[in-house]
Image (spheres, helix red, strand yellow):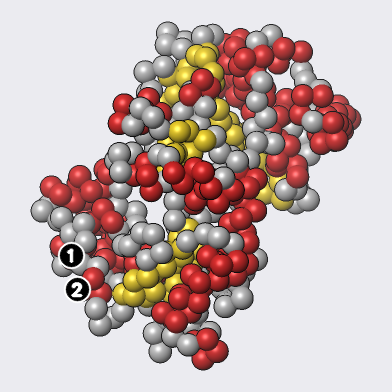
Amino acid sequence: MDRVILHCDINHCYAQIEEMMHPELRNVPMAVGGHEEDRHGIILTKNDMAKKYHLKTGESLREAYKKCPHLLIVHPHYDEYLYYTEKVKDIYREYSDRVESFGLDEAWIDCTTSVSLFGSGKKIAEMIQKRVLEEVGLTVSIGVSFNKIFAKLGSDMIKPMGLVEISRENYKEKAWPLPVEDLLYVGRATMAKLHLFGIETIGDLACFDDKVLKRHLGKMGEIIYWFANGYDTSEVALVGTHDEVKSIGNGITTPKDISNVEEAKWVFYVLCESVAARAREMGLVGKCISIHLRSKDLKSFSRQHKMERATNLSDEMMAEVMTLLEKNYDFSLPLRSVTVTLSHLQLETQEIQLSLFEDATKRRKMRDLEDTIEKIRGHYGFHSIKRCSMLMDERLTDFDPKGDHIIFPVGYF
């Protein structure tokens, strides 16, 4: 028997939640966006009235204002988004024990074993849409299919409150005529390459030579070929299943450009403290430190170094970060944004080879100090205790990467 997979997408999620909390926002062109003064000014999502002005997710507020001068920008309230999207997913979980989130606003539901209780996949989708609207106040578009990729494709086809079923019998009629960029993981760069081969639609991709695709696009060429043909067999994860953490990182686009090594050091200390604290909370240590730098002209690059011993201490991380920075950047152009990442992770409880040249007592004191700082911040707030260096330029260092609820998109793989 074919699987019955639903993909549910809360329509313009952040904007719809803001409208639900403040109904007057439904009557004006509105978008949820960042703070332009802090250079985080991009459109995250927009309401239906703003869509008429052809605003695009990810474009700058400056570009958006040119299209719609009277656009109202609402700054994001991630705590509210987390609360309401979880209430929606609680409804999903009443129909299956396999509900896999794809970001805050999207989720797959495997209803294969649920149809005997609730009816067909389409019937379940209708019930979910009705309940989410009545119980939470949000509209949801749903795709129903025999695999995850086509289910997501279906949920994207009609907005808002759309319901599209893509079956083995009709996928060539419904999915294949769509633009190839509608397929998951066909971004701008991949789309441009596919167009060079004359591939314009999902059907063109499905009928193309997969060996040629793999030769020119690598493994991803083979993957999207399988997606287009409906060969996706990936399972919907069980409720409570979490992917293994492969890296821990934090980054910031600073309110002003970073002009020299000393300014970079102040910012990197804030980031390293956050990454180290998050690693300790998860009981992890890492052996590889990476930095990602983006200059004023928006060119970026990354550098990394593998350490002899795994760590979750900010001072040890900072030593590696500053070595990488000083070896690889001369500040002929100021930096616009920086990121620190700890990878090659392992459990802290795993046996670690000791070094004869290491002062174990000093390291223990460093750990106790960092744990104490986190406890103080947890009780009295992030700003209750800081390094003196963070007071040198508070415009650069006045941010809390660990405490801020910044939501990033997730990957399918």
Query: Image height check: is 283 above or below 374?
Result: below
Q: Residue at x 57, y 78 (%)?
A: 95
Element under disc 1:
loop
> Who is closer to the viewer here, 259 or 138?
138
Most distant residue in the left direction? 198
Q: How many numbered callouts? A: 2
Compare residues 140 and 113 and report the one nearer the observer: 140
Q: Is residue 77 above or below residue 210?
A: above
Whether residue 312 is visible to the viewer of this picture, yes or no, is no
Label pair 1/2, CB-CB below 8 angstroms: yes
Helix, strand or loop status at disc 2: helix
- Residue 311 to residue 133: above or below: above
Residue tagged by mark 2?
A: 173
Where, by quadrant of the figure, is residue 162 drawn? bottom left
Q: Which residue is mark 1?
A: 177
Name the quadrant containing residue 158.
bottom left
Categorize mark 1 by other alpha carbons within 10 Å: few (<14), some (14-19), many (20+).
some
* Residue 216 appears left or right of 368: left
Please identify the quadrant where the N terminus is shown: bottom left
Residue 312 lies, in percent from the top left, at 72, 37
Image location (x, y in percent) of residue 386: 77, 20
In which quadrant will I find the C terminus? bottom left
Identify the amino acid type marked 1: Pro
Image side of residue 407 versus residue 336, left or right: right
Residue at coordinates 64% horizontally, 32% vertically from top-left? Answer: 401
Coordinates of residue 381 in the picture (x, y in percent) = 79, 31
Q: Amino acid at mark 2?
A: Glu
Q: Position of residue 76 (x, y in %)?
A: 56, 38
